[in-house]
Amino acid sequence: MLKDLPKAQNPALLVGFDQSDDACVYDLGDGRVLIQTADFFPPMVDDPYLFGQVAAANALSDVYAMGGTPTLALNLLCFPSCLPLEAVRDILAGGQSKVTEAGAVIAGGHSIEDDVPKYGLCVTGFGEKTRIWANRGARLGDLLVLTKQIGSGILATAAKAEVITAAQFRPAVDIMATLNGPAAKLAAAFDVSTCTDITGFGLIGHALELARGSGVTIALQSKAVPIMAHAAEMAAMGIVPGGAARNLDFAAPFMAASAIDAAALDILADPQTSGGLLIALPERDAVALSHQLTESGITGAIVGRVETFGQYALRVE
């Protein structure tokens, strides 16, 4: 198990596998750091090009979440021999489009034959040593800003079950394919305490990671959380991915949420693909960042606050 692995001994490795961070960070010794991550998964959409875009945006997000800029990427591709080469090409083209949009370069990659298609990237980025956004620096009084709506896991489940149409699902796909780079660039002008991106552990899981890593309590304002169209309706119908229940089971010992109904909790625990950034920063900066994000056409919802640690690391209100 991961917890049984020895901690990295190299002092240049500033962030490694011993914490629940989004990427590793290596000190280059000249004020800069190298940021490295890898992420890939099977399709959640039928269109190969869109799948490539979403998978690439998801992998690139880890570098943005650490405060860095993506520079190089390597394709990671698994595909069955029966998959048409046109589909393979479209997956790679979709990924290429997002890497190019990020200002990075695909320098190669690796592919293997597998029964289920999978795609993603190994991404290398760079940042400043004095501005690493590790997920354990939240400060008392900070507010939390979320930069994308949540609900993509629920909507993907509903689309697969044909409860919603492809047209109803498409806005969620567009959100998943949106890079977090512009949001991270705006945030970089402020005094960011900590940051993470919202992916498989859901908003609840990733907020809990920030709280436990920082030794604080995070009060999450459920009614302030932006939700994708149709996600609340689907959650009320019980159309929720199994990952949401697993996320809630994990969070339960560390969380107080007695006044929140089951459907709302399912949305907050919904595993996201290529979700937004969750950024903690002082109240004045959080309000200013929220306004700038909104003016730029990006979600900028203030969804919680950082408090002195109490009985629970996470309180959902």
Image: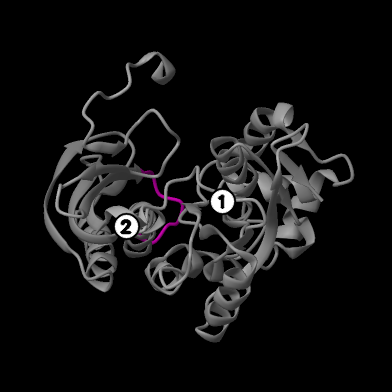
Three-letter amino acid code of the residue under disc 1: Lys
Compared with 266, 69 (above or below) is below
Q: Which residues are the magenta region?
A: 41-48
Q: How is the image coloured?
A: one colour
Three-letter amino acid code of the residue under disc 2: Ala
Percent coordinates x, y for residue 103 in the rendering: 22, 71
Looking at the rendered image, the disc whose residue lies closer to the viewer, 1 or 2, is 2
The answer to whether mark 1 and mark 2 are in CB contact below 8 A is no
- Determine which residue is flagged by label 2: 56
- What's the residue at 24%, 23% (across, down)? 9
Residue 237 in view in this figure: no
- What's the residue at 76%, 43% (across, down)? 315
Is 45 one of the magenta-colored residues?
A: yes
Q: Secondary structure at mark 2?
A: helix
Overall secondary structure of the magenta section: loop
- Determine which residue is flagged by label 1: 160
Is 16 one of the magenta-colored residues?
A: no
- Left or right of 132 on screen, residue 79: left
Percent coordinates x, y for residue 171 in the rendering: 55, 71
Compared with 245, 261 (above or below) is below
Residue 163 in view in this figure: yes
Percent coordinates x, y for residue 122 in the rendering: 23, 47
Percent coordinates x, y for residue 225 in the rendering: 70, 62
Q: Nearer the viewer, residue 63 or 117?
A: 63
> Quick one: label 1 or label 2, which is nearer the N terminus?
2
Q: Quadrant of residue 152?
A: bottom right
- What's the residue at 29%, 67% (across, down)? 98
- What's the residue at 59%, 74% (across, down)? 290
CA separation in Å, label 1 and label 2: 21 Å
Q: Quadrant of the N terminus?
A: top left
**Residue 170 numbered tag:** none
Q: Secondary structure at mark 1?
A: helix
